[in-house]
Every structure is written in C-alpha cells, then in structure tokens.
Image: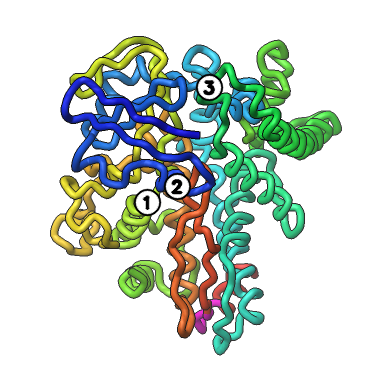
Amino acid sequence: MAVVGRRAHRRSHCSATSTCSGSPCTDRWPRSPPRTAPLLSLRLGARRSLLVSAHAAAVECFTESDAALAGRPRLLAGDILGYGYTDILWAPYGDHWRTIRKFFSVELLSASRLAARAADRRAEVAALVKNLLRDVDGGSPAAANKVTLRPRLFEFVINVMLRALIGACLRGSDAGSFQEIIEESVRLNGAPSVGDLYPALRWVDRLRGVHAALARLQARRDALLDGLIGDQRRKRDANSVRDTKNKVAIDELLSLEETDPTYYTDSVTKGIVMVTMKKARTEIDTHVGLARLAEESDITNLPYLQCVVKETLRLCPVGPIIPAHEAMEDCTVGGFHVHRGTMILVNAWAIHRDPNAWDAPDEFRPERFLHDGSSNKQLVTAAATMPMLPFGHGRRRCPAEAMAMRLVSSTVAALVQCFEWDVGEGSAIDMAEGGGLSMPMATPLAAACRPREFVKSMLSAAST
C-alpha cells in the first residue's frame, strides 16, 4: 500500500514515498525530518495528512490550534475496538469525550485518588520484587539467572490498574491471557488497513481478514470485561451496605449506569476500563537506605533517577507517533493552511532526537536534565521546559501521565535498589523495535538478575 507524499506550497515541505508493512512505524517515516521538513504534507491513500516533526510546530498544534485539531480520524480499529468510537482514545471531541475525560480525571487519576491507592501500588511493587526473587533461583545471592522482564512487568502494571478499577488483581495464567489480549490490541491497532486510507475500499479489509481479526479480538476483550463487570455487579448486589470509603472506579461507573442508564451503557463502561545504574543506586541507597523498599514519596529526593526515566522516555517514547488527531475546521500550523479533515501525525520520535534541540541526541545522557550535571535535586530541569512529548500535549494529552510517572519511577527505584543487573556474559541487548503502535523490543529483554544480600530480610521484615 503506497504512501505517496505531495509537494507542498513552500520549500520547507518535501515529498516522501514509503511502504506500509509490518515494520515498526518509526521505520515508515523519515528519521531526520527536523533537518529538512518540520512539516510534511502527505497523501496517505485518499486521506490528506500532515506529519509534524518539529517541537515548535507540535506545540502550536496543541496550543493555539488545539481546539481545531482535537478531532480523531474514524479508523476501522476505533469502530470495532473502540466500541463504535465511544472510548476515550477514539471518541470525537465533544460532550461525550469531555464526560469520559472528566471521569478519568476525577474518579481514577486525580491526586486524591492516586494518593488513596498508593498502598496498592506499594504492594504490587513488593510483589514484583518477590516474583523476581523466585525467578532467580529462590532469591539466592549467589544466583545470577537471566529473567525475561516483559511478562513480570506486564503483570505488575495490569494489576496496578485492576486494583484501582475493581479492587482485585490477576496472577499466573489469568494475567497471561490478559497480556495476550493487550498485545494483540496494540498489534492490530497498528496494522495497515486499506479502508482507512481508501474508504471506498473498506471491503478489501474484509477479504484480507483484517475486519475478522479485529472482531475476534473484540469478542475476547468483551468476554473478559463482561466477567470483570459482572463480578463487581454481583458483589454490589450482594451487599446491602456499600463501602464508600474503599470504592473503586468500576463501582462509580456502575452507580452512574444506575442513575443514567441511557448514557452510561456497558459499552461506555468497557471503553473506560480499557487506556545509569551505579549513580541511581548510590542515590537510592543514600536517601532510602537498605531497611525498606523505595516508595513513591522518595522520588522527589532521587533527582538522578527522575533524569533516567525522562531520558528513557526521550529515546524510547512508548508511542513514537502520537495518536492521530484530525482537523475539525480549517486552521494554520507553522504559517501553512491546514484543511478541515486533515489527519495530524506528530512524530515524537523525531522531535525527541532533533539535533537542533538536543546535544548528542542519540546518546543516553540522563545528566542533560540537570542544569549543570549536579545531582542537587533543586537543579532538576522540569520536563515542561524540554522539547518532549512522551504523553502527547494539549487537551487530548494522556490523562494517566501523573500515575505513569509515579509508577515507572518507583518501580525502577525498587528494581535498582534490590537487584544487581547485567546483560550477561558475552551477551548484548537487541534494541531492534517491534511492530505496532508502540515501540516494543522485537526481542523481549532478558537480563541477568542477582538479588542484593539485604533484600530477603527486608521483605520479610516488611511482611511481619
């Protein structure tokens, strides 16, 4: 399926030709647009599109032109996996989207809700460390077995979310099934669709099996979510006195279904349910110590660790291309006219590696986020002042950013605190990117992991 660029009206635009395939999406776009084309006008099939690869232009898209560019293109995945364009990712900008966004902001991801569920997140961090101890030969300090981190980290993240949503968690095979569904969702969301680029040829997707694959996946997702929602509904019906203090997000959704059943249908509810080592260790050992596990409250005293997280998000953004926006009305970006209906693609990968904005952009340098390379916490540069877009920008910015930063920082702190890590003798890390909307490693990371001597006693003391 050809993606043919169109020469635009000014010299700062250029044309490009590439082929959509199963390769990672960052391989399908120019890797150095900031040097030649901060804005690139494209024809993706019959769809007019604009690729934004400069930070200033991206900020303009999400500030001055944010309201005009807040729409979403109506793609096949959004219809089938997004419950008919009703979930927060795919819903068009308007009253419905604002209602869902408000729910996320108030009931699930507000500062008070995050603080209320902090104990759940601490418990899951401890469970992750214990699972890794079992994986490396029972936690023996002499052992340095290789562990594949992806399944453990997935189980950890999904259980943090499930604790907030339903007050329960999944282990073992149940977590594995959930992981398969999520990974398949990411893969199919990023798969090329003829009908998305040529709406008149939507029938081709049926012949190619794209529509059927999405429908099968949605049936599996529906069955899983029906079980979660049904279990919680039965618990509510069985309790005459409801616990308002420990109420989880799905309780609030079911209450809304009762008060406004025409709006908060099961489909809407399902859509909401679904969205350098040595220095770091020295810092953690100094400010946290060896007697307890690092917690979220420690992060403000760990500036170098914060820099490591930010630098990782800069070099490897979860979404190298920010989820597509669509112009709901004519507007101007970078001095160029953007027609209504144009699909806006912001190339975060290129912006994060723009040599005009970053020194040595392809090198991993956490110190770049410190004013003078010092580890003084007052000198940490706020992410808002740097040309980074790991969570998007503007009104459709990821609502879970605050929780993600808390979770990633505290988890990395605990893993660095509790284990010695190495790639293994004679090994190298394969940084090749996999396919789909995100940037997973094509080969899951397997690292040699040795627990530090104090870890077992620390966890035993914490559990008594």
* Direction from residue 25 to residue 212 in the image, left or right: right
Name above or below for residue 279 compared with residue 182.
below
Q: Tell me if label 1 and label 3 are in contact, CB under 8 Å.
A: no
Q: CA distance from mark 3 to mark 2?
A: 28 Å
Q: Is residue 3 visible?
A: yes
Q: Tell me if label 3 and label 2 are in contact, CB under 8 Å.
A: no
Which badge, 1 or 3, is on the more N-terminal residue?
Answer: 3
Helix, strand or loop at label 3? It is loop
For mark 3, what is the residue?
A: 198
Q: Is residue 178 magenta?
A: no
For mark 1, what is the residue?
A: 313
List the single residue furthest toward the right.
238
Q: Residues within 10 Å of mark 3 (few under 14, many from 20)?
A: some
The type of residue carrying mark 3 is: Tyr
For mark 2, what is the residue?
A: 318
Helix, strand or loop at label 2? It is loop
Q: Residue at x 16, y 46 (%)?
A: 356
Q: Residue at x 62, y 35 (%)?
A: 274
Q: Is residue 228 visible?
A: no
- Residue 241, image x, y percentages: 78, 30
Q: Residue at x 68, y 50 (%)?
A: 180
Quarter-of-image position of residue 320 = top left
Q: Which residues are magenta?
A: 450-455
